[in-house]
């Protein structure tokens, strides 16, 4: 996605539920190791997508270390991830949930 392998975790109880894309804080600091405990509570009502952004978490291992991380680049990544998720789930819209850096 957007020229880089990016890590996504997608789970939920009903594929007909609306999709929620979670945008973690950071930059460069994923909380995916802990987010499942919190986001799992939303899985009854949403198909939850937890994304490790560029230069963070499990996406970091695929990221060229000379890439300048900017808010424009991460917004472009988010658009690519959202398009991928919508296509994957067959939905035409999703809900964004961001904390800290993820609210930008």
Image (cartoon, rainbow, N blue to C red):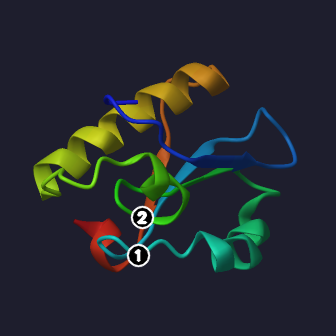
- Report the number of discs: 2
Badge 2 density bin: few <14, some 14–19, many ≥20, Cα 10 Å: many
Measured Cα–Cα span from mark 1 to mark 2? 5 Å
Residue 42 location in percent, x, y? 72, 64
Q: Do callouts 1 and 2 mark residues in contact (Cβ within 8 Å)?
A: yes
Relative to 59, say whether 97 is above or below: below
**Residue that lies at the very extreme toward the right in this rendered image:** 13
Q: For the point 55% across and 47% down, which residue is it?
A: 7
Which of marks 2 and 1 precedes in the sequence?
1
Q: Quadrant of the C terminus?
A: bottom left
Q: Is residue 1 left or right of residue 42?
A: left
Q: Which residue is mark 2?
A: 56
Name the residue nearer the viewer: 12 or 54.
54
Q: Quadrant of the N terminus?
A: top left
Badge 1 density bin: few <14, some 14–19, many ≥20, Cα 10 Å: some
> Regarding mark 2 in the picture, which secondary structure is present there?
loop
Q: Which residue is mark 1?
A: 29
Residue 93 location in percent, x, y? 48, 32
In which image quadrant can residue 76 be found? top left
Relative to 72, say whether 28 is above or below: below
Q: For the point 60% across and 69% down, which residue is it?
A: 32
Q: For the point 44% across and 69% down, which residue is it?
A: 24
In which image quadrant can residue 102 be found? bottom left
Residue 76 image label: none
> Regarding mark 1 in the picture, which secondary structure is present there?
loop
Name the residue nearer the viewer: 58 or 73.
58
Residue 61 location in percent, x, y? 48, 54
Q: For the point 70% across and 51% down, which residue is it?
A: 46
């Amino acid at each position: 996605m957007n020229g880089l392998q990016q890590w996504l975790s997608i789970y939920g109880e009903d594929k007909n539920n609306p999709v929620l894309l979670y945008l973690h804080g950071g930059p460069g600091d994923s909380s995916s190791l802990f987010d499942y405990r919190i986001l799992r509570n939303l899985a009854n009502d949403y198909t939850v997508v937890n994304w490790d952004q560029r230069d963070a978490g499990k996406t970091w291992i695929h990221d060229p270390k000379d890439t300048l991380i900017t808010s424009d680049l991460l917004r472009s990544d988010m658009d690519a991830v959202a398009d991928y998720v919508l296509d994957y789930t067959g939905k035409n819209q999703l809900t964004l949930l961001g904390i800290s850096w993820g609210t930008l």
